[in-house]
Each structure stands twice: as structure tokens, then as C-alpha cells.
Image (spheres, rainbow, N blue to C red):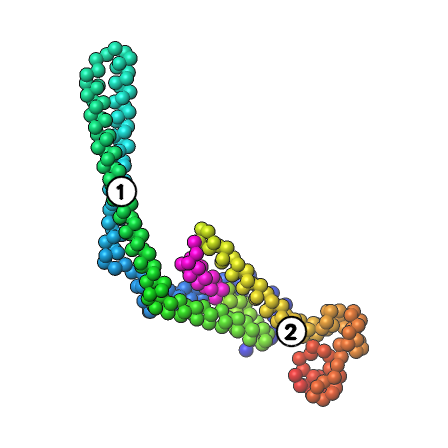
Amino acid sequence: MSTRVDTEDVASTRSERVLAVVLVVFLLIGSGWSYVKIDDWVGGSRAWEYTAAEQRSIDAADTAEDRAWRAEEAQDTALTDLELARENLSLAIEQGQPTESLTETFEEAQTEYAEARAEATTARTRADAAQKAADDAYAASEDRGRGKDGRYWIVALLRLGFVGALVGGSLRLITVQRARESRYLTLGLSAVAASTLTAVWFAGDYITDYIDVLELGPLVLSVLGAGATVVAFVALQRYLARRVPRSRVRKGECPFCGFPVRGDGPHCEGCGREVVGECGACSSPRRVGSPHCAVCGAD
């Protein structure tokens, strides 16, 4: 049996906060494992797998890019050799030295550079063509995953339901704990934190499938998060508006303004409003905001 306390006045100890963080970690491990396993159970990730032809196009693009890189490296080396040969020949001419061998070396360097340049140009053209085919393969896989294969959407809906159940269940838990004035409210808040982080993971996971993270991704996530926070804040204020009068009455204060109640007068000395009404069950005087009638016990 938990101790009944005013949850608005609960001051968690350091040990309780540490245990709450530990609980969040373990809850995240479980929710994260379940989130990932939904895809394994349904097979949604297989909707993104490449066909044999698409995989060959991707592999060919990688090979062609490697060849183009090597050809361009050889071109740079040949250009360096050509410039060095030109400088040596120019220096020999300026100094009046024999130039037959240097001229031959320079001409060979020119020929090697021309061949390397032609080979690099051809390799780059082939690499660009292969990359275009690979891009088409990537696009085809994305089309299957997002629209043509229902497994992707089944996984998304199951994950949405899973996250919704976590968030709704955790909020329901703390609502019940607050209603019962349970001392274990901190554990309920841990469940809310874990479910909220899982929801953020879900939002980021699917938003990035359709929005460039480097462009609008953070903005969209910020807008959605801010909107959800405002909604939660409004819900919290409505909850507090229902709970604050009861909490104030328990402390011996006016349920409307919080001014300390002195005496049995029907009006608050702070705001002047009537703080003693009539019980709806027995018509006895009853303080506004009290959970039960002191005469008949009606709620």
C-alpha cells in the first residue's frame, strides 16, 4: 500500500532521481528493442532490398568510380612529370647545355600525359554513366519501399500504434497515480520520459525519409515538438485548474486565491469570494473544494 501524499509537494531524493534515470534507461532498451523488432517481424526493411540487376548497377558504379579515381591520379602524376620535364628543358636551353635527351624526355612526357588525360576522361564518363544507373536503382528501391510494398506502411502503422500505446499508457499511469496521490509518481514520470523519447525517435525516423535533414528536417521536428509541448502544457494547466483548489483546501487556504483561511466565515479574507457552500447531498455547510462533505461524507 503506497503512502498518500500531496503529489504537488513531493520532493524526490537524490536516490529516487538516480533510480528514475536508471528506470528510463531500461525502459528505453525495451522500447527500442520492440521498435526495431517490429520491422524484423513484418519484414518492412526487405521492401528496400535491391534486386539482382540493381545490385549489379550499384557494384558497377563503385568499380567505375574506383577506376576513374585511379585514372585521374595517373593523370595528375603525368602532369607533374611533364611540368618537371619542361622546366629541365627550359633550364638547359637558358644555360646553353645539350638538350637532345631532355627534349626526348619532354616529348615522352607530353605523350604520356595526353594518354593519361584521355584515359581519365573516358573513365570519368563511364563512371558518371554508371552512377546514373546506380541512382536509378536507388530510386527504384525507395519507390518500392515507400509506395509499392505494403510492408513498409504496415511497419509504420504498427510502430505508430506502439508509440501511441506507450505515450498514452504512461500518461494514464501518472493520471491514476496523481488521483491516488501515490508516492511512486516519480516512477510514472520515468515512464513518460521513456515513451516521449521513443516518440521523438519515431518522428525523426520517418520524417527523415521524406525531408532532407540538412534542410527542413530539424525545422519540422522543432515545429512538431513545440506543438506537442504546447498541447501538453494546456492539458497540464487544465489538470492543475481542477486539482489546485483541492490542494489549497488541504493546506487551509482559499481555493480561489490561496489566502490562508482564518475562522469559519463564509467568505475569503483575501479575495472576498464565498468559500463555504451547501452540500448537494445533505445541504450542510461545506467548504468549496473539499473532496468530501464533513457531515454525510458525500463526494
Q: Mark 1 is on which residue type?
A: Thr
Q: Residue furthest top?
A: 96
Q: Residue, x 38% and y 67% (percent of image)?
A: 153
The residue stretch that appears in magenta: 194-212
Q: Quadrant of the N terminus?
A: bottom right
**Closer to the camera in the image, 270 or 233:** 233
Residue 22 visible in this rendered orientation of the protein: no
Crowd around label 1: few <14 · some 14–19 · many ≥20 (10 Å): some
Give SS at disc 2: helix
Where's residue 191, x and y in %? 49, 68
Q: Quadrant of the C terminus?
A: bottom right
Q: Mark 2 is on which residue type?
A: Arg
Which label sits on residue 242?
A: 2
Looking at marks 2 and 1 on the same chain, the residue that comes earlier in the sequence is marked by: 1
> Which secondary structure dominates the residues rendered in magenta?
helix
Q: Is residue 12 magenta?
A: no
Q: How many marks?
A: 2
Q: Residue furthest bottom?
A: 282
Which label sits on residue 125?
A: 1
* Structural distance between the alpha carbons of marks 2 and 1: 72 Å
Where's residue 62, x and y in %? 26, 48
Where's residue 271, x and y in %? 78, 70
